[in-house]
Amino acid sequence: MTKQQATIIVNGSYQPAQVTFKQGVPAELIFKRISGQGCLDQVQSTDFNFRADLPLNEAKTFTIDTSKPGEYTFSCGMDMAHGKVVIQ
Ligand SMILES: [Cu+2]
């Protein structure tokens, strides 16, 4: 079974703001912040239990549990900008 990956560019917003993974296939969600725009220097998800700084121009990778289908959210550190992970 291959690994799936999705990269989200953080550039004042999440681009894209929604990614989709297949259920049951190991997944990595990668954030790369390329500008100081907005308040997106931290990313967090209570659904996936992560919170981390996003250093400028560095890829930050999170392993995602894809065992349960559904819609999961992440946001900036202040919960103002939002994104979604769909597992199906
Ligand atoms: Cu924010």
Image (spheres, helix red, strand yellow):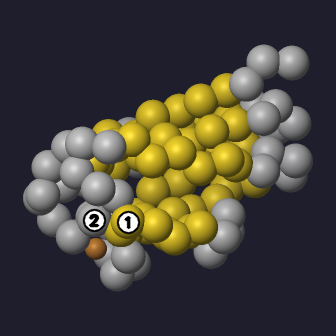
Q: Where is mark 2, residue-wise?
A: 41
Q: Could you tell me which quadrant the N terminus lies in?
A: top right
Amino acid type indicated by mark 1: Asp
In the image, what residue occupies the spot 12% across and 58% down?
A: 36
Question: Label 1, label 2: how many angstroms apart (C-alpha)?
Answer: 6 Å
Secondary structure under tag 2 reads: loop
5 displayed left or right of 9: right
In the image, what residue occupies the spot 67% across and 64% down?
A: 48
Q: Dots 1 and 2: beta carbons under 8 Å?
A: yes
Query: Around disc 2, counting alpha carbons within 10 Å, would you say few (fewer than 14), some (14 to 19), or many (20 or more)?
Result: some
Q: Looking at the image, in which quadrant does ligand 1 appear?
A: bottom left
Q: Where is residue 57 in the image (x, y as percent from the top left)?
A: 24, 42
Mark 2 lies within 8 Å of ligand 1 (Cβ measured)? no
Q: In this view, does 83 lie above or below 39?
A: above
Mark 1 lies within 8 Å of ligand 1 (Cβ measured)? no
Location of residue 3 by image quarter: top right
Secondary structure under tag 1 reads: strand
The earlier-in-sequence mark between 1 and 2 is 2
Q: Where is mark 1, residue-wise?
A: 53
Amino acid type indicated by mark 2: Asp
